[in-house]
Amino acid sequence: MFVYLIKRRHGEIKIGIASDVKKRLSSLATGSLDELAILYSMRVGQAARHIEDGFKALMRFYHVRGEWYECDDDTIAMLALRAAAHGDMIAASIVKAVIAWRTDGGALSFNVEQHDYIERRIPEWASRIRSIRERQGKPLLRVNIYPETWNNARLEAKRRKRPPVS
């Protein structure tokens, strides 16, 4: 069995389980007006349902309907899937930090362990962090990423008035 993430052209991401992901994509595309693409798939065997449930728990803030999630950043979905599949607690803590920032506002902060993880595994985020470090002129133990240098997702979430994630 595989756990997969399929993305609509407009940003919604679906998580699911299938023995043949390409066949599943084809069946979803038949009933959809949107262009669909496989964002990621992972062979997981019997753990598929457990991994899917872990992803859903981490991503509940982004839930739209059924197994569809409105997530403007593919990296968040990938981190949530990695956390669920591998018990990656650092990835899970980064997902939770981003969700908390998007619901509460203010600055997004990472501790050193999270920051090192981002530097090694998420290069597109690492470049944002480096530019903030350069502006501040010093290495930081706690890295703050402010909304104006990140994206407008927090403001969009507030506009939709989604409930805070605990």
Image (spheres, grey):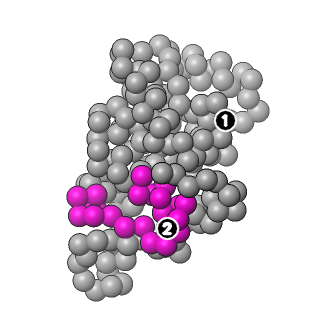
**Residue 140 sits above or below residue 118 on the image:** below
Residue occupying image coordinates x 49% and y 73%: 106
Which mark is on residue 65? 1
Quarter of the image for residue 13 reads top right
Tally of marks:
2
Q: Nearer the viewer, residue 121 or 95?
A: 95
* Residue 42 coordinates in the image, percent (x, y): 39, 27
The answer to which of marks 2 and 1 sits earlier in the sequence is 1
Which mark is on residue 96? none
- Residue wearing tag 2: 150
Residue occupying image coordinates x 32% and y 71%: 143
**Residue 12 sits above or below residue 53 on the image:** below
Residue 107 highlighted magenta (yes or no): yes
Residue occupying image coordinates x 23% and y 72%: 141
Residue 119 visible in rendering: no
Contact (Cβ within 8 Å) of mark 2 with mark 1: no
Residue occupying image coordinates x 48% and y 51%: 166
* Residue 127 coordinates in the image, percent (x, y): 36, 66
Q: Amino acid at mark 1?
A: Arg
Q: Secondary structure at mark 2?
A: helix
Q: Amino acid at mark 2?
A: Trp
Find the distance from the CA under tag 2 to the CA under tag 1.
26 Å
What secondary structure prevails in the magenta region? helix
Residue 46 visible in rendering: yes
**Residue 46 sits above or below residue 139 on the image:** above
Residue 10 highlighted magenta (yes or no): no
Q: Nearer the viewer, residue 139 or 161?
A: 161
Q: Which residues are magenta?
A: 96-115
Left or right: residue 99 compared with residue 64: left
